[in-house]
Amino acid sequence: MSPAVNNCTQSCLFCWRYQGLLETSIPEEDEPEDILQGAIEGQRKLITGYKGDPRTKPGMWEESANPNMVACSLSGEPTMYSRLGEFFEACHRRDMTTFLVTNGTLPEVLERLDPLPRQLYVTVAAPNEEIYRKLCVPLQKDGWSRLNKTLELLPSLGTRTVVRHTLVEGWNVGWEKEYAKLDEKANPLFIEPKGYVFVGYSRERMHNDNMPSQDRIMDFSKKLAEETGRGVLAEQRASRVTLIGADRSRMRIRGE
Ligand code: SF4
């Protein structure tokens, strides 16, 4: 879900959302509790039809109707919602796990965010400013230095941190040494190279062959792991994603 559906500080070419609105602020904000309750009700509405399907296990349906995890991602830049801390507080009060995915252009928000989400993702979709400007199309003049400030801030934040590299073939795959420098600045718990997917409105700006193959993502991941002195811990081929980290004991892998 997202508390900022149409609002963002970038216009990434690989973004799947509709970008015609270009809202760089949220003029009217909803109450944090209303957003959370609305998201849960929306989830219940979404899964209603599955209850009568004989393939659906009743226990699993109940579990889905009572979600215990909130991921602020999906669309827009969630840190533009000025009451994000209150929103996380509402989630934690209900014993829900919280994930936040941010483009990192609002370091001042992350600096004072209280409470922090249980896991914080920062997307770094460019190895340098030139590619960042062309691919992520920042709407702030100093977008790149803001992102770098966020990366510098990351080690001081008391939560699990992840740097995500969204990889777009023909645009930003490679430059492992440059990515490694950015990753070292942030020193995250995990690095997640993830392939761009040709869906939604991004199809108006990208092509099918901008999706990197899993072999290409793995090749990038191995080189990046070497540059950062880490290892490739896991991969999920169907999602075209890998996980790089230093310490296997700090993560739980499904099935282990
Ligand atoms: S930062 Fe996220 S929501 Fe904003 S344009 Fe880029 S991909 Fe889309």
Image (spheres, grey):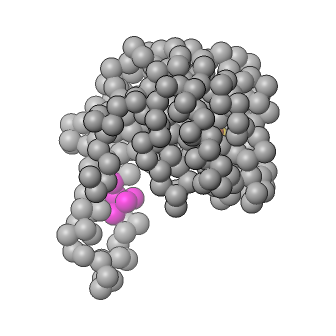
Looking at this view, is 157 or 170 the one in front?
Answer: 170
User: In the visual, does 4 lie left or right of 45?
Assistant: right
Q: Is residue 104 visible?
A: no
Residue 250, quarter of the rendered image: top left
- Name the residue: 43% across, 33% down: 245
Highlighted magenta segment, given as a residue range = 40-44
Location of residue 201 in the rendering, given as x and y in whole percent from the top left corner: 70, 55
Q: Nearer the viewer, residue 161 or 190?
A: 190
Which quadrant of the render holds ligand 1? top right
Residue at horizontal 67 percent and vertical 24 percent from the top:
178
The percent coordinates of residue 64 (x first, y second) are: 29, 62
Residue 236, given in percent of the width and then of the height, sits at: 47, 55
Looking at the image, residue 231 sits to the left or right of residue 6; the answer is: left
Q: Is residue 206 magenta?
A: no
Is residue 124 visible in the rendered image? The answer is: yes
The reply, left or right, for residue 158 in relation to residue 155 is: left
Residue 41 within the magenta-colored segment of the rendering: yes
Location of residue 251 with respect to 64 vertically, above or below: above
Residue at x 38% of width, y 51% of height: 39
Residue 71 in which image quadrant: top left
